Image: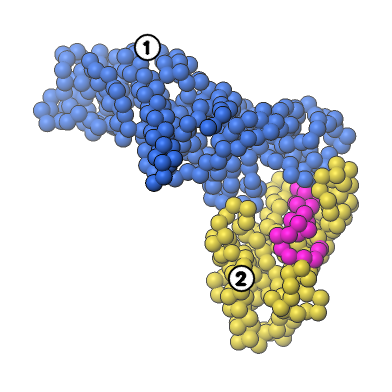
Chain colours: A blue, B yellow
Amino acid sequence: MGKLAVQIKKMRKTTQQSYITRMVNVVNYIQQNLDNELTIAVLAEQANFSSYHFHRIFSGMLGESVKELIRRLRLERAALQLKTSNDSILTISLAAGYESDMAFSRAFKARAGVVPSKFRKSEQASFPCLSRSSVRYVTNEHISSFEPFIDKELNMNVMIKQVDNMLVACVSHQGPYQECGHAWDTLFSTLAPEGLLGGDAKMIGVSYDDPDVVAPELLRYEACISVEQEFSPTHSTNLKNVNFKTITGGCYAVTTHIGPYEKLNETYQKLFGQWLSQSDYESVDKPCFEVYLNDPESTEPEDLITDIYLPLRDQAHG
Amino acid sequence: MDKIDLFKLHKADYIAPKNPQVCQVTSACYLAINGIGGPGEDDFNDAVAALYAVAYTVKMTRKKQALGDYVICKLEARYWTEEKKCLTDVDKSQWHWQLMIRTPAIVEVSDIAQATKVLTDKGKTKSVNKVKLIEHEFSHCIQVLHVGPYEEEGSTIAKMAAYAKDQQLVSTGEHCEIYISDPRRIPAERLKTILRMPLSNSLDS
């Protein structure tokens, strides 16, 4: 191996370590504040992450969402309390965030295999292993490091691209991402009669929200087609749903997702959790965007090709 | 309103067997553009872009006018040479081609004219004015599925030729392809292409 390669590998290791170190702060903060309300903004702050993409980095590295981790840690704490305290099961249930001991019992059994009362009495019942993640509930100690959820060979093709500002015509959509079709219909049928579907018009989708955090009905999306200049319609009766905006250029990490749009989120998780956390880059507070390279009407879902653009902080890379 | 999907409606025209098989392709309407030269060269690529630009502009404009919606079909191509020579014996620069996208019969010539006009006004895609609406009947053909790079079609074509000989069928000399996969991103070894050999006689004649 060349000297440079060794150096790069070392550097990689350091950055990855720094993502892990920062994420450890977040995990410890969660452990210490299990009974408080934990917002994404507060958690992101603990580790000096920009809050915009924090959750995707988190779930990508930890393999579970913030909500799931909190629920699981509370269950693990409850298991410990069942064994070590004399508190009633109801008290423990409420502390774990459940409305009743029935609900707690169900959730506990689903993950630990036995109901809480049985678990409490049994000498042999081992502590439930509730997750593939290496983060466990601990008392009186801090977590100093953890194994990222995905730490295999980096089998993801990512290119760093310098992107120019792009003027687009766009139609907004709010609701489940799968239902954005009507926004596309409006956009296409406005642009087609203007002769704007020719040339190298790009089909771009901007997803503003992480579907793991934001409720489906509140997800914000924009269907965009690149245009050369703003226009007022000569062939359409109105333009009221179509806006113009500039997708700001800059440094982007680009990876290609092949497969159904429903599985885009998996690639996002991998990009943030696996690639970004092992790279020398930082994301910035701008939404990612997607470029659709084929027609979903005439293409089998497994053959759909989508480029995902993740905005990075510009850096002089030496 | 249901979307028309000609590719699914006329499945029999797009059978893609592993081994060559005879089929009968009915007469149909296509958006088409002609040219000369090697596939993948500038003229060819420009023609593909022009064809798709017209196809989507027509589709979406008609949809806007509530004239019905349909799926844009896969790209098809016919290749031939001037003196009906075997394509492999002639330099690619002398290949004639017609690129086609099957289109529902409800689409009218005036739709194409309108689309061509607005696209030309914006001046974005050259050669849109070469796109026309045609009717074509492939009629009797041999079809087979080719999986792999376009450059390796030779052996699959040889299989078709052997089958034709065996069945005493005669090719018109034209070679046709239907592009199932997207060559921009699908790795060459996984590209799926239907190869079609139009026949000048048929089994039952």
Q: Is residue A150 above or below residue B165?
A: above
> Image check: B191 left or right of A34?
right
Question: Dot 2: within a 10 Å radius of its alpha carbon, few (fewer than 14), some, or many (20 or more) residues?
Answer: some
- In the image, farthest residue toward the front: A3
Q: SS of the residue at dot 1?
A: loop
Amino acid, disc 2: Glu
Closer mark to the observer between disc 1 and disc 2:
2
**Observer-nearest residue: A202 or A283?**
A283
Q: Which residue is drawn at 78% across and 74% down?
A: B81
Q: Is residue B99 above or below residue A250?
A: below
> Image check: B199 left or right of A156?
right
Discs 1 and 2 share one subunit: no
> Image check: A25 left or right of B148?
left
The residue that mark 1 highlights is A36
Amino acid, disc 1: Asn
Q: Residue at x 56, y 33 (%)?
A: A310
Q: Which residue range is magenta in the image?
A: B34-61
Q: Which residue is drawn at 39% across and 30% down?
A: A14
